[in-house]
Amino acid sequence: MELDERKKKILKAVIRNYLETGEPVGSRTISKYTDLNLSSATIRNEMADLEEMGYIIQPHTSAGRIPSDQGYRFYVDTMMEEKDREVIELKEMLLERQDKMETLLKQVAKVVAQNTQYAAMISAPSTHRNKVKFLQLSRVNPSQLLAVVVVEGNVIKNNIINVTEEISDETLLKLNILLNTHLNGLSMEEINLGIIAALKQQAGVHGSLIGEVIDAVGDAIKADEDLEIYTSGTNNIFRYPELTDNGKASELVGAFEEKQQLGSLIQETLESETGTGIQVYIGDEAPVKSMKDCSVVTATYELGEGMKGTIGIVGPKRMDYDKVIGTLRTIQSKLDELYKKE
Amino acid sequence: MELDERKKKILKAVIRNYLETGEPVGSRTISKYTDLNLSSATIRNEMADLEEMGYIIQPHTSAGRIPSDQGYRFYVDTMMEEKDREVIELKEMLLERQDKMETLLKQVAKVVAQNTQYAAMISAPSTHRNKVKFLQLSRVNPSQLLAVVVVEGNVIKNNIINVTEEISDETLLKLNILLNTHLNGLSMEEINLGIIAALKQQAGVHGSLIGEVIDAVGDAIKADEDLEIYTSGTNNIFRYPELTDNGKASELVGAFEEKQQLGSLIQETLESETGTGIQVYIGDEAPVKSMKDCSVVTATYELGEGMKGTIGIVGPKRMDYDKVIGTLRTIQSKLDELYKKE
DNA sequence: GTTAGCACTCTATTGGGTTGAGTGCTAACA
DNA sequence: TGTTAGCACTCAACCCAATAGAGTGCTAAC
C-alpha cells in the first residue's frame, strides 16, 4: 500500500494532536480539526490502513490511535526536510564567554534544559586533535615534580610526579628543552607511545629515572580523556508519566548519573555526522537501553579551533521535536559566534 | 510522664520492626516478638501512652503505630550512646590511594551508595587552610600568562591570564620572586585582599599591568572554592516508595543534581562538630527542604594534612541507622589510614 | 497491674453496574 | 468507486456497596 497525500495528512494530524495532548486520538477529533472535510467514518477507514502499515497503534480496541516508533520516524523525517527551521528565540539566554570550559558547559546544559523542559546533557569537546602550545616541568620539592601542559583552547592539564631520587637543576632544564622541542606543536593524539619511546632514547640511558618522568608527562597529556559530561534538568523526566511509570525513572536517573552510559550516545553522534549535526533517535534507536521509551535528540557543536562536543536532549517520544531542534540550532550558532574570533 | 524501662523496650521494638517492614506495627506483633511476655492489651495501654508522649503516631484509627520524628530521634540517640558500634565490613571495598582527588571521591561515593543502598554524596575537602607550597607564573605566548599554584595535599590550581601588553622576561622573573617570597607557606585563607594590595604596593607603581597579573594570581588561588560535590546511587531513592510518592522524587533528584542545595548540608555538618564527626538529621532537621521526608546522615572525614570533607547519605526515615553509621565509620578510618603516612 | 473479650473504626479489596469514547462493519448514497 | 450515516460492540475508567481484616479502646474480671 502507498502512503498517499491524504494518509500523510491524517497521520501528521494524529501525531501532532498526540504530541499536544498525550492522549490517544480518535477519528472524530481528526475529522473535526483538519481541513480535510471528511467524516469520522472515512477517517476510520484511513486510520485502519495506517495501522496496518505500522504507522499508528491502538493501545486497546476501544481507544484512539497513538503513533508508533515508525510513525514518529516518518514525522521527524518529513519535518526535517520540509524547510529550514527558523531559529528559535531562547528565554533568558545569556551565555558568556568563559575561560573555564566547565562553567560554560554547565551553563549551556542548564539553558537547554530550562528552555525545552527535557533532560539535557553536554559533553566537553574532545581535545585529541588539539596541539600542545606550552609544556613545563617544575620542581615542587625535592621529591615531587609538576608537569603542566597547555593545549589549544586553553585546556590545562597537569600531573604531580613523585620521584625517588632528586633531579638536578641542569637535568630539569635539559628535560624541559627536550620535551618542548619534540612535543610542542604536536596534537594530543600524535603523542603516542612511539614518540614517547623515541624521546626516552634521545634522553640517553642515564637512569630509568628520566624514563619515568617522561612517562608521567605522557600520562598527564593522555589523562582526563575520560569523558567529561555535565547534565541538567534530570528531574524534568518526572513531567512525563510515560517515562516514570513502573520504575523506569530509576533507570533513567541512573543513566544520567553514571555518565558512562551517556558516553555511547556521544560516540554515536560524533561518528554518524549528518549535514546539520543534529540527530534524532526514537525509542530503540538510541544506543542506551534505558532510553528505549524515550526520544533522544543530539547535536554536535564546535568551539572554534575544531573542538567538537555533543549536546543531547532526552524526553518522551511525544517530544516537541520542532522546538527541541530549534533550540539546539540556536545553541550551535551562539556557541559558534562566541568562539569565532579566537 | 516518664519513659520507664518497659516503655523504652516497647518503643525500640516498634521502631525496629518498622525499620524492617515499613508497615505500621500493631500491639499483637510486639507482644509476640519481644521477650516481655506481656499480652497485646497491655502493650496497647503502653502504646497509647507512648503516642500521647509523642514518640509514635497512628496513621489512622485502625492501624498500628509508626515512629514519629521524635521517636526516631530517641532511637538514634540511645543507639549512639549504647556502645561503640563495631566497624562493619564493607563489601567489595577497594579504595586505592589516588593522586587525582576526583577519582578517589567518586570511588568513595560509589562504595558508600552500593553498601548502604541509599543515595550518597561526598564533598571535596576544603583547601582554605592548606598552605601554598609552589607558585609559578609562566608565559604561554606573548599575550597569555599561566599561573600555577600547588598547595598541600597536591591540589593544583591554575589560571590563564590574558595580558594586553607583553611582559619582559625580567619582569616575569621579578614577579615570580615577589610572589614566592610573600605567598609561599601562607594558607589560602590568609591570602586575602589586604595581602594582595600590599603585594601590589611593593611591586611598585610601574603600570597597572602588574596589578592585573597579581589580581589574576589571587583569583587562581581563590578559584575552585566553589563546592565540588560528587554523588552516587541517586536512583536508590526509588527503592523507598515513601520518598517517591507524589512527585517527591523529582525534588530529591533535583537536589542531587543541583549540588548547591547539598552545600548547606555540608556547611552545617562541618560547623556542628560532634565527637565522632557523625551527625543524623531526621526529617525537618536537615537544612534542605526537599529532604523533609528523609533522614540524612553525614560524616566528616580527614585526609591527612587536615583536609576535611563531608560524606552524606540520604534515605528514608526508616533507615538502617546502625548499618549506615557503621559504614561511615569504616570509611572514615580507611581514608585516615590511606593518607596517614603523607 | 495485667489480661480476656467485645464492640467499634477504618482501610483495602472485591465485584457489579454504568458511562463514554471509540471502533468495525454494513448498507445506502452521490 | 469513494464517502457517509448508523448501529452493534468493546473496553477502560469510574462509582458504589459490600466485605474482610487488622487494630484499637474500653470494660470487667483476675
Image: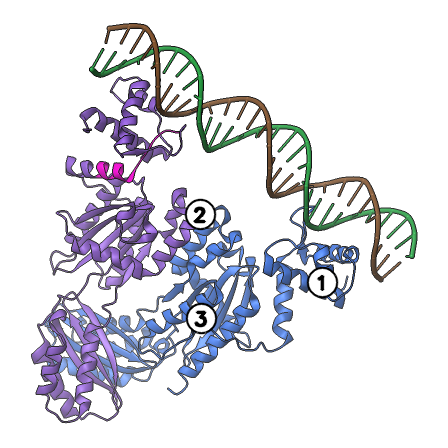
Chain colours: A purple, B blue, C brown, D green
Residue B81: x and y in percent read: 63, 74
Q: How many marks?
A: 3
Range covered by the magenta-colored residues: A63-76
Q: Which residue is mark 1?
A: B10
Residue A66 in magenta stretch:
yes
Residue B111: x and y in percent read: 42, 70
Q: Which mark is residue B310?
A: 3
Question: Tag 2, which chain?
Answer: A
| Residue B80 drawn above or below residue B234 | below
Q: Helix, strand or loop at disc 3?
A: strand
Q: CA distance from mark 1 to mark 2?
A: 37 Å
Residue B197: x and y in percent read: 28, 75
Q: CA distance from mark 3 to mark 2?
A: 34 Å
Locate residue B341 relative to residue A339 in the image: left or right. Answer: right
Locate residue A341 relative to residue C27 in the image: left or right. Answer: left
Q: Helix, strand or loop at disc 1?
A: helix
Q: Which residue is mark 2?
A: A246
Residue at screen point 40% across, 78% down: B307
